[in-house]
């Protein structure tokens, strides 16, 4: 796997814990990448430098009963755009996740999760039915052989290998309109409307609920982990809370005006850097994760930051999806230089609200278009 850590991913192989589900191949147990998309507003942009083709997709297998009907994929997929097609179950996609050869896209309208095999040609699979208890899913994270999906008042845990439901975690006060999930070793952190919950990722047991005023939580919308620090973006009050990802202990709140946190809704974390996207200020803030000091702020149309909604890191690049102007900006993480600004009908972007990246490819979730665009950088 490439050097990828994306928004709302908080998982390190060093702290991996075995899941309760049966294991599959070692490849599937490697680190997986997640990005949670949330909406923003913006204007217009333009750009080139990636190859885009279109897929002619077959109708998927719809799995509403036993998960054994999953279609596993063979060969290589010829496509880089999954078109807006009701057969794919992408009416209003709300979250996207990736794990070595497979994409999962949650749909808030159909209360379903569609699985695509980007490394292979074949039929997508739509997971739906009462056993999943999907209800307006808002976030996905993947680790080991398990995928977690956040619903309006519950977390559905299922196996990536066959879609079998492991458990559904629910409870008043514990799961309340979650907006983000992040996995760290044996812990699953859940960002609720006004709190952050800690759950045992192996057993599903409830460990802690953080809601005291000192945490400064106000509509947490994104989470990211760098080393052992858990960074929580609070869209309600324009702050970022830093916690110890192992213990949940409070460390600090970033609230200085210099950070330019205007309704922060997306985060991406690398080994020493944290990026926070704020649509209200049309900005991307870069922070040193060791000292919590502001390093730089990238903002404005000339940098392509207009209503940023989601981000992904990959091989020295950060990809920013701008929902309002339907564009994607590519930056060099070393110096913040704008490399490409992609926009136009050729890309199929329509209010992009999620993005994941790995192995030199980028996938963009288009919430308004009911589609996923795959980019191949040249």
Image (cartoon, rainbow, N blue to C red):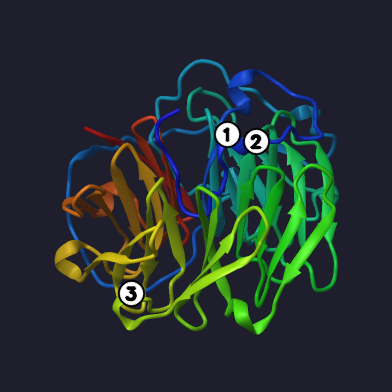
Residue at 72% from the left image edge and 64% from the top image edge: 197
User: What's the distance in space between the residues labelled 3 and 1, CA to CA?
Assistant: 31 Å
**Mark 2–mark 3 distance (CA, rounded to whole Å):** 32 Å
**Contact flag, marks 2 and 3 (Cβ < 8 Å):** no
Q: Is residue 269 left or right of residue 92?
A: left
Q: Is residue 169 visible?
A: yes
- For residue 269, which numbered disc appears in the image? none
| For the residues bearing labels 2 and 1, Cβ distance under 8 angstroms | yes
- Identify the residue under disc 1: 13
Mark 2 — residue?
A: 16
Residue 164: image location, x then y, percent: 80, 36
Q: Which mark is residue 259?
A: 3
Q: Earlier in the sequence, mark 3 or mark 1?
A: 1
Secondary element at image label 2: loop
Q: Neighbour class for label 3 at 10 Å: few (<14), some, many (≥20)?
A: many
Residue 134 seen: no
Q: What is the CA distance from the residue labelled 2 to the residue labelled 1? A: 5 Å
Locate residue 63 relative to residue 355 in the image: left or right. Answer: right
Disc 3 is placed on an element classified as: helix
Residue at x-position 48% and y-position 59%: 367
**Which one is in front, 42 or 213?**
213
**Spot occupied by residue 251 in the image (x, y as percentages of width and height):** 55, 68
């Amino acid at each position: 796997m490439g050097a990828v850590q994306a928004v709302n991913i908080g998982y390190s192989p060093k702290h991996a814990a075995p899941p309760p589900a049966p294991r599959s191949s070692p490849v599937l147990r490697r680190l997986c990448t997640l990005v949670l998309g949330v909406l923003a507003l913006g204007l217009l942009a333009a750009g080139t430098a990636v190859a885009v083709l279109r897929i002619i997709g077959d109708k998927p297998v719809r799995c509403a009963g036993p998960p054994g009907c999953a279609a596993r994929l063979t060969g290589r997929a010829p496509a880089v755009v999954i078109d807006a097609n009701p057969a794919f179950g992408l009416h209003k996609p709300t979250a996207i996740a990736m794990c070595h050869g497979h994409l999962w896209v949650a749909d808030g309208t159909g209360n379903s999760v569609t699985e695509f095999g980007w490394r292979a040609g074949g039929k997508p699979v739509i997971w739906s039915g009462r056993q999943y208890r999907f209800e307006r899913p808002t976030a996905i994270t993947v680790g080991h052989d398990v995928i977690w999906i956040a619903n309006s008042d519950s977390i559905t845990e299922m196996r990536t290998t066959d879609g079998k439901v492991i458990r559904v975690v629910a409870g008043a006060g514990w799961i309340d309109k979650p907006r983000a999930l992040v996995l760290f070793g044996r812990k699953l952190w859940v960002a609720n409307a006004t709190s952050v919950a800690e759950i045992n990722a192996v057993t599903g047991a409830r460990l802690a609920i953080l809601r005291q005023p000192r945490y400064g939580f106000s509509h947490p919308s994104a989470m990211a982990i760098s080393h052992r620090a858990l960074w929580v973006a609070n869209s309600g009050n324009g702050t970022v809370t830093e916690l110890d990802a192992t213990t949940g202990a409070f460390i600090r709140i970033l609230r200085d005006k210099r950070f330019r946190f205007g309704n922060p809704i997306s985060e991406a974390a690398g080994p020493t850097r944290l990026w926070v996207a704020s649509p209200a200020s049309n900005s991307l803030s870069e922070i040193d994760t060791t000292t919590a000091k502001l390093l730089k702020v990238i903002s404005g149309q000339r940098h392509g930051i207009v209503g940023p909604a989601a981000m992904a890191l990959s091989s020295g690049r950060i990809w920013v999806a701008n929902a309002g102007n339907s564009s994607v900006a590519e930056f060099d993480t070393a110096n913040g230089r704008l490399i490409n600004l992609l926009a136009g009908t050729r890309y199929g972007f329509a209010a992009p609200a999620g993005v994941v990246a790995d192995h030199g490819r980028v996938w963009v979730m288009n919430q308004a278009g009911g589609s996923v665009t795959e980019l191949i950088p040249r």
